[in-house]
Image: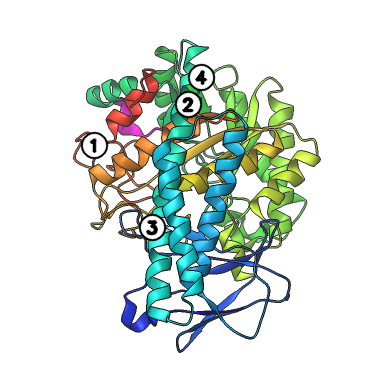
Amino acid sequence: MRFLVHPPPSSSGLPDFTDAYLSGMDGRIFPSRIEMEGPVLICRRPSSESAKLNLPWPVPGIGRPVLTTTSLRERDDPYLLPVELARGKLSEVRESWASWEQSGMAIPDAFRKLQREAFQFFAKAGVAAGDLDSACQLAASAIERACAASALLIDAYTVQRLTSIRRSTHHAPGLVGSVLDSTVLTPSGQEIFHHAFNTASIPIHWKDIEPVEGTYHWDAVDQLVEFCSAHRTILRGGPLIDLSPGGLHEWLTPWKNDFLNLPIFICDYIETTISRYQGLIRLWEVAAYGNTGGALGLGEDHCLALVARTLEAAKRTDSDAQFFIRVDCPWGEYQRDGRHRLSPFQFVDALVRSNLGLAGVTLEINSGYGSKACYARDMLSISKLIDMWSQLQLQIHVNIACPSSATPDPLADPRYPVQDGVWRDRWSEETQADWLEHLVPLLLAKSSVNGVFLSQFGDGVPHRFPHAGLVTADGKLKKMFEPLRHQLHHELS
């Protein structure tokens, strides 16, 4: 598939197109090779059926969200890229508008005006294709207004859904929590936690618990569990097994191709851990990142089999608990590299069909961390993602993260560099708070979402995502505290 980029990337200030990929009508992502030949974007893949192009695209006032074309056939003449992105965004917005209006949602007049303007600009761009400068300027105006209309529509949906929920209940519509660390045990940390959260996620990493085979260190986890239990806080434990690169012990390497003994080591640890906290922790993340994998060089099928065995062991140990698995990159962008056969949805669906007692899935949604994490999306795209995962009829937890700064973070994982400008403006405490203020209410407005968790509490201990904590490395409270407190205390911002 071929797309004309005008003006050419070298002179237009557009980002490179290495993160672009092609997807099918059913959402599956094709292994794609993306190249620029002069002003033409060339997208190659194994099949020739119709496909959608997905790529991060700069939109003034919005950031750099992933925009998606409609489904297009292959042809000799290149498509004009800005026009097709405008067509795709308008289609997405109008589809959601029609669906929600049919279900009884009140549609704001301001939205109707913006989407009408977007359509008019798009129509003019379509008939001005002979004048590339004019067509691309008109298409850019259509995209900008369509994205603004999308934001208005999703805000109206969120407010109306939460208002309906809060009329029928006297407590928050879902769990609002954070992944904890030792900084929460300080006096200031305890006060912050109790004002912002009603649920705690206790990290239980095998590499920390059993650094040497047969030698267990439970003190750090015991302290967090004791603190939460004393304050009657709902607990979620895990993930017990981390299947991302470097997530499993190096001393397991000799058994990485041993399909009999490797699961025995893993299941023994799971049974030991769940038994230790049985009755205290009722929600467990048994395994994480099995869909992307990478630990010990294990293949996709081996990771799927290991996750299945961990669920069996967990259910056998505590039949009254609820068991989740954590999913990385839930849109599945990583499939564009061609190393994974199953989408994230298909990976989890295979476990559901195996009837292993899976109660829910934790989706990891982050913004601003480069191609190893999620690509940036607007709130309408996140809403559609949750609706898709709801089809599995599982409980959904969502772990969220975005940075409060683009400065170096020596305690963060270097695989996740901060990308500026993907949401509104440069990352700051205000930008971070703005992202959470839109995202958290939207997630809690979804009936399938039972809990929303901040991916890390503080920035003062080693962590995955740079500057994503509620508390800075020197102990200062960040501005995203207020959006979180509003949700816990039943307030509409």
Rendering quarter of residue 491: top left
Q: Nearer the viewer, mark 1 or mark 2?
A: 2
Q: Earlier in the sequence, mark 1 or mark 2?
A: 2
Q: Amino acid at mark 3?
A: Glu
Dot 1 and dot 2 residues touching (CB under 8 Å): no
Element at badge 2?
helix
Dot 3 and dot 1 residues touching (CB under 8 Å): no
**Is residue 242 shown left or right of residue 18?**
right
The reply to whether residue 328 is in sight is no
Count every numbered label the image shows and give the total: 4
The reply to whether residue 350 is in sight is yes
- The residue to which callout 4 is attached is 164
Residue at the image point whose x is 38% and y is 80% from the top: 7
Vertical placement of residue 490 versus 342, above or below? above
Disc number for residue 75: none
Residue 362 or residue 58, whichever sits in front? 58
Q: Nearer the viewer, mark 4 or mark 1?
A: 4
Q: Earlier in the sequence, mark 2 or mark 3?
A: 3
Residue 185 or residue 115, whichever sits in front? 115
- The residue to which callout 3 is attached is 144
Percent from the top left, x then y, of residue 487?
Answer: 38, 24
Dot 2 and dot 4 residues touching (CB under 8 Å): yes
Percent from the top left, x then y, of residue 304?
Answer: 71, 51
Q: Amino acid at mark 2?
A: Gln
Element at badge 1?
loop
Magenta highlight on residue 354: no
Magenta highlight on residue 180: yes
Disc number for residue 160: 2
Decide: few, some or many residues near mark 4? Use Cα within 10 Å; few <14, some 14-19, many ≥20: few
Q: Earlier in the sequence, mark 3 or mark 1?
A: 3
Q: Amino acid at mark 1?
A: Lys
- The residue to which callout 1 is attached is 478
